Image (cartoon, rainbow, N blue to C red):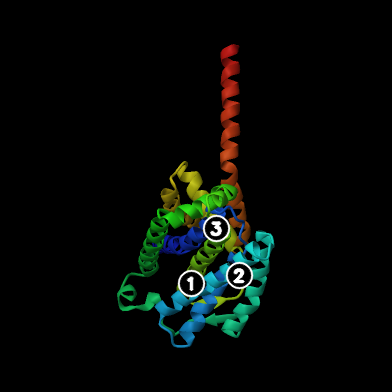
Amino acid sequence: MSIIVSAIGQGLTWGIVGIGLFLTFRILDFPDMTVEGTFPMGAAACVAAIYSGASPLVATLIAFLAGMLAGLVTGLLYTKGKIPVLLAGILVMTAAYSINLRIMGRANLSLFGKPTMLKNHFLASLPPYFDSVVLGIVVVIIVTALIIYFLQTNLGQAFIATGDNPNMARSLGISTDGMQIMGLGVSNGLIGLGGALVAQNNGFADVNMGIGVIVVALASIIIGEVVFGDLTMNQRLIAVTIGSIFYRFVILIVLKLGFNANDLNLISAIVLAIFMMLPVLENRFRIRHTLAKGMTKHD
């Protein structure tokens, strides 16, 4: 039971990272590689702030701002520097590694004996692993509600229009550069927030904890879409978190089958590839089934 509760808690926490990537990957249609730098940056900023005496809540907000700053740099490199978005993300991701080392002063920083959001009186009184579930639910609800509200505003509609058709959006007087910079900033801010929560849940921050993050976040998005099918924009945001929980259960099952935990990134990539190919495989199966049925009737 504790393993299941732990998987749900991790799924909720990583769902925030999935929501952040959803803004760029699905709405803006950007393959943003910055996330593999901003995730550990959020963790590093949060842990370093706690070490400096900041409250866990303030430290988490600092992590959000740190991630947002990195996303804004990527946006400026792309829109003003005319660097391709994929390369801009890689440049910022690479620079973030050195910045994270500067922030923490070392490659790994533990939170042992330090206060975290999971150690407040109420959450500490809950059964094991329920603290991360409750905190994850609260944060996911707040983040999802704010994004849903934002997307319904005029600014949010301009943001969606920029992703759908930038040329049309410009013809309507929308500053597509501004929308893209904003999207990359908010997206990476949420990913930094996710990094801070994961660091507090795990009890440490590490400069290498961003490796494979984009695969995990994409898995949350793809699994949610494949499982639930056609959804509205608001429903897709909710499906990302549910997809993240499903992904954690898939990984849990795979590890229970005896696979090595060191192969987690390989397993994650394989799981993501399978779910991305499911619609294609389903269509091919349907076509073959239809053809076979037609040939049977003809005979």
Q: Is residue 259 visible?
A: no
Tell me if mark 2 has few (under 14), some (14-19) or many (20+) residues whose alpha carbon lies within 10 angstroms of its own.
some
- The numbered mark at residue 223 is none
Residue type beneath disc 2: Val
Kindly identify which residue carries mark 3. Answer: 175
Tell me if mark 3 has few (under 14), some (14-19) or many (20+) residues whose alpha carbon lies within 10 angstroms of its own.
some
Earlier in the chain: of badge 2 and badge 3, it is 2
| 285 lies above or below 83 | above
Looking at the picture, how far across and down is residue 158, in whole percent? Answer: 49, 53
Residue type beneath disc 3: Ser
Q: Quadrant of residue 96?
A: bottom right
Q: Secondary structure at mark 1?
A: helix
Q: Is residue 17 visible?
A: yes
Looking at the picture, how far across and down is residue 73, in whole percent? Answer: 60, 70
Relative horizontal placement of residue 134, taking residue 258 as reference (left or right):
left
| Residue ID at (63%, 58%) | 266
| Residue ID at (38%, 64%) | 133
Residue type beneath disc 1: Phe
Residue located farthest toward the bottom when viewing the structure as drawn: 52
Q: CA distance from mark 2 to mark 3?
A: 18 Å
Kindly identify which residue carries mark 1. Answer: 64
Earlier in the chain: of badge 2 and badge 1, it is 1
Relative horizontal placement of residue 172, taking residue 232 as reference (left or right):
right
Asked if the residues shown at circle 2 and circle 1 are in contact, with their CB atoms under 8 angstroms apart, the answer is no
Asked if the residues shown at circle 2 and circle 3 are in contact, with their CB atoms under 8 angstroms apart, the answer is no
Towards the viewer: 167 or 8: 167
Kindly identify which residue carries mark 2. Answer: 73
Q: CA distance from mark 3 to mark 1?
A: 24 Å
Q: Secondary structure at mark 2?
A: helix
Q: Quadrant of residue 178?
A: bottom right
Tell me if mark 1 has few (under 14), some (14-19) or many (20+) residues whose alpha carbon lies within 10 angstroms of its own.
many
